[in-house]
Image (tube, grey):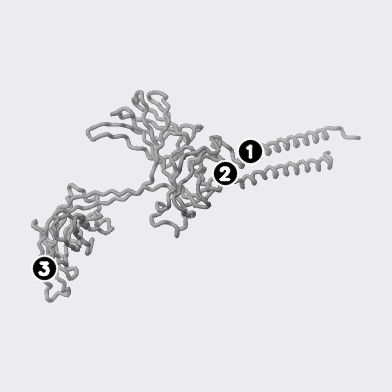
Amino acid sequence: MMSLIKIKKSSFTLRVALCGLCISVLPLAQADDIELTPKDFYKGAELDVSAPSPFYRLTLPEDVYLETVYPDLRDVRVFNSSGQAVTLALSPVDNDTTEQQNIPLRIFPMQMSVNKPAENQQDDRETFTFKSAGGVEVKLYQDGERKPEATYLLELNQDKDKPEDVGFNQIMLDWAQNSTNWQAKVTLYSSSDLKDWRKQADNAPLMDLTSGTDRLLLNNVDIDDNYSSRRARYWLLVVNSDEKIAVPAISKAQGVVITRRTAVETIELTFKSETVSKTEAIYQLPRPQPLSSLSIVPEQSNTVLPVNIEYRSSEQDKWRPLTTTVVYQIHGDTGYRTSEPLTMNHLLVQGIRVKAVNGNWGDTVPNVVAQRERVDVLFNGQGNPPYLLAWGANQAPKATIGVNQLIPAAEMQQNGLQGLPQAYAGNTVVLGGEERLTATSPVERAQQWQTWLLWGLLIVGVAGLALVVLRLARELMEPKAK
């Protein structure tokens, strides 16, 4: 049988192996504490700031998107003049747009008559009856002490302007300008059937004032935010004036539709194309990008072509189906038209493969352009300028925080992030060089060393176990002494 001394030796070998494993973890723990410096990044650019501030906003240069290692921009940093990394956050760049559409309204002057309340009625208010030349009649109770000076019925051309698709934000009026200054107040009602009227504006000011060559004109009436009432077909404009000067006749009216949109700004990314055949082409980006849209347009004029589109997220990935669609470029009577971009929903893409289903695109492959969301870097003005933007480090862990964590609510500007002082990137300089794009981090190196050590210990353990088994088998096979 195996002796007690041999068992003790085996236990000692096991303890040595465990100690070796614990020692292998020490470099990993130490690697977590190593801080990155600007030399750990591929490139950088000095930042120009106009005035001292606790926070700055920087719009990333377009080259940064293509030269970072990680699609989520985690390897972007900002350093102060002492080489210390400052706290930063990433935020999409919003683009606010406002569109205005003016829709003409037919205008009908109304004749007014005053109706005294009957003696037996509880309501002692006067009522006004307004009649148009076409026979339309509207009755309203007196609203306040003033009597209307003029009243107009405004009508939307339902057949032409499709009121179900619009909602007015304003009514804009026009009149003949004269040399006399005047001011008035108007009340505006809306109705869909000429029976039930809803007040949309009360005592809204109108004025036309001149002083020398200057003119102060206020000719629009704002409407409330009730969308259903803003879509009414009929509008009643009641003009009241406290002045003895007569108000000029309203000669024109328009409904104003104001549409406000907020969209995230994007940048265009151009693919490098490779022709496989007249029916197949491959397009590649330098690095994977989360795309918001993808545009594919044939180069030949008046071309309509069904295509099959595939994508991959890295050069090592297999091609995956994206969609089958029709791309086109048409020059016709209605002008120049191209196929609509495909919505990508931040899909990670490095390469695109396009195959013609029927036909071919000739000698020139289609033009493919992608878009991804533009990003602002918001950073804390810690330390002294000049600040340095750095990017492109394979060994960089994620270091950004949320915008609300970076900027306290009390410090947020009235117009939001757009109110923060702007920082501008100068000329690009090489910091640590292109090798930083593939350099392994201390953590990764420690993990690799630990993996090899663990494999070595496992091999030694297996060999030791095999040796113990051989010795045990040999002792069992030895003839016992009589």
Comparing 66 with 456, the one in front is 66
Report the residue marked by disc 1: 448
Comparing 9 with 37, the one in front is 37
User: Residue flagged by tag 3: what amino acid is it?
Assistant: Val
Res 37 label: 2
Mark earlier in primary sequence (3, 2): 2
Residue 342, by quadrant, is top left
User: Residue flagged by tag 1: what amino acid is it?
Assistant: Gln
> In x, y percent, where is residue 428?
48, 39
**Quadrant showing the C terminus:** top right
Residue 228, by quadrant, is bottom left
Report the residue marked by disc 3: 114
Q: Residue furthest front?
A: 212
Mark 2–mark 1 Cα distance, whole angstroms, equals 23 Å
Q: Which numbered disc, 2 or 1, marks the residue closer to the eye? A: 2
Task: Provide the secondary structure element on which disc 1 rests.
Answer: helix
Q: Please say if 184 is above or below 370.
A: below
Mark 1–mark 3 Cα distance, whole angstroms, equals 95 Å
| Labels in figure, total | 3
Mark earlier in primary sequence (2, 1): 2
318 with respect to 336 (left or right):
right
Mark 3–mark 2 Cα distance, whole angstroms, equals 84 Å
Residue at x 22%, y 64% (from the top left corner): 203
> In x, y percent, where is residue 430?
52, 37
Mark 1 packing: few (<14 Cα in 10 Å), some, or many (20+)? some
